[in-house]
Amino acid sequence: MNRARRDKSVARTTPDSGLNRSSWKEAWVRAACSPWGLALFGAALYWLSLPPAKQPWAAYVACGLWVAIIARDTAPTRGEYWRIWWVSTAMWLALLQGIRLASWPLYFGWVALSLYAAVYLPLFIGMARSLHHGFRFPLPIAAAVAWVGCELLRAYFATGFAACMLAHSQVPWPWMLPIASHLGSYGVSLLVMFLSALAWEWLDWVFWKRKILARHVSVAFLSRQSTFTLLAAVVVIASVLSLSWHDRWIAEQSPIKPLARILLIQEDMPTVFDGPPENYLLGWNRYERQTSLAAEAVGENGVDLVVWPESTFSRLVPWIDRDRQAASQPDVAPDRIREIEEWMDVKAKRISSIFRNKPPLFLLGQDVVRLTDSGTRQFNAALWLDSEHVEEAEYYAKRHLVMFGEYIPFLATFTPQWLSGLGLPNLDAGDGPKAWRLRGGATVSCSICFEDVLPHVIHSHVRGLTDLGKSPDMLVNLTNDAWFRGSSILDHHLNNAILVAVENRRPMLVAANTGISAWIDGNGRVIRALPYPEAGFILAEPIPDGRWGWWQSVGDWPVRFLTVLCFLPTSLWLAKWFFWKRALPGPTEIKQ
């Protein structure tokens, strides 16, 4: 019996028996330490760091694995870069899977957006390698600069897409966010990547010194370099903690008197493409009833402002904005205009009658049609309504529209006969930001839907209003997230609102149809939130936040400089490879 066992054991370890256990283990280790293997594990951990898992620590490990690809002596082959792109595509498909829930055509948009966003991982690795190996940038600096350069490019290119940034993984750790008030979300991303690269550099030296993984990841560092790396990490972490503590201390010294009492109403208005009109009527009635319940709950103290989410006040009837002194539009019947205006007056009086003693102001998601002599324009807008002066209502028209969701590129210029009857979206962009003053003196600025996903859009709003002497005391976002059916897209959207609050050091109020409505302070803390699909209201009493940060003055210009610093050496390296390397004789030619 013992001899038979010994013979089997020998057979398992004999080279003639094929792939034995040690060779399988060797193959697994080799695959895991290959560029695409490191990219695969890093992508899985990056997904884990963001909603719905929300594990901030995983972002550091993911970045460390990607930094290992950058630090390798041998560059990834063309095939390995392609495999990294496919791995990145799978990661983005998992992160953005909620997009497909809005309508079946958006399955194509989900896949197309994922394929596009996936380009930035191999691009980041290639640029960081050129900085580190080609231009001798220190590894942590090369990785951090290349990463924020890619994030900035993603935020601007093709109308911009800045969701699921590395900074958003740190939202559960508010003490990591204060740097966003100076460098924006990009600063938080830079910090995470920098710390991850420092940690990997030190651990790599330890592994190399102890002969661990030496055959697979070979980058040698002297002991003093490792010690410097460890000290640099300690200094950076201590600086971040000190900044966080200092910001909290200043916030505690600020006045505690609230700016206003604001009701954020959340209900469930059914939202589908080409849905029946009854859905919009049902949603309007639900919001009217929920507002009545909120008015009863607040009692005689009353509120200053009531906020309904995007598109919920329209009830299939747009607000008409027309120049009464201009000629009537030939394609709009005057009787129809009067009918719409009378119905809008009825709706305004219905919601204002809910608050019997002292009607508040209203900020309502409303479709707007502007009639001028030059033509008709349609807006997705937020209506600022005083029930006592309905005819003087103002509105903010959404400036940054969602491609294919709110407009089709070139549709206004080229409109074929067969395309005009499909009911495709073709909204117009607004002219500029708006700010309104409450009766108590506080100023409110508004954004709609995914405008808060792009940091530079909200910064341009705040900066432009400040230059006009209308600096907003608080920010409000009106959104209709019912399209995404409670998926992690709702959490991604909320993460963007949290970073916007920290970047601009202003309270952020989110009114969302079906959720997630939230009251966020200037530190990025969610004071209260209504989850999906809970119906209810939030009585928000935001506190003014007077802290200043570089972001409020200069926006993302420092990050743009880093992006140029990242792309310029890479461009020179590519030019050198293309023009000179091809002209030089190869090793075989020299030998001959």
Image (cartoon, grey):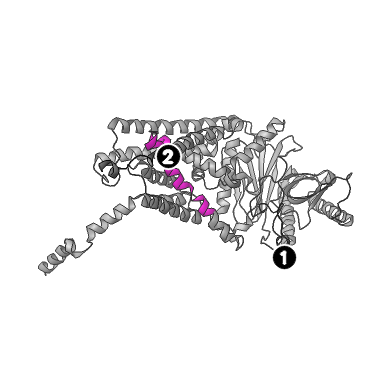
Residue carrying label 1: 276
Image position of 318 with respect to 358: above or below: below
Instruction: Work out whether residue 577 or residue 212 is closer to the camera in this orientation and state it.
Output: 577
Relative horizontal placement of residue 375, taking residue 193 as reference (left or right): right
Residue drawn 69% across the image and 40% down it: 445
Relative horizontal placement of residue 258, taking residue 323 as reference (left or right): left
Which quarter of the rendered picture does the C terminus lie within? top left
Find residue 571 and report its horizontal and vertical position in percent.
47, 38
Outermost residue, left direction? 3
Which stretch did the figure color magenta?
113-142
Q: What secondary structure characterizes most of the magenta part? A: helix
Q: Residue type at mark 2?
A: Phe
Outermost residue, front direction? 592
Q: Residue type at mark 1?
A: Pro
Instruction: Work out whether residue 591 or residue 446 is closer to the camera in this orientation and state it.
Output: 591
Relative horizontal placement of residue 390, taking residue 544 as reference (left or right): right
Tell me the number on the disc at residue 522. Answer: none
Relative horizontal placement of residue 32, taking residue 545 as reference (left or right): left
Find residue 285 and report its horizontal and vertical position in percent.
74, 59
- Place residue 549 in its image quadrant: top right
Find residue 378 and report its horizontal and vertical position in percent.
75, 51
Residue carrying label 2: 579
Q: Of tags 1 and 2, which is closer to the observer?
A: 2
Residue 507 makes an appearance in the image? no
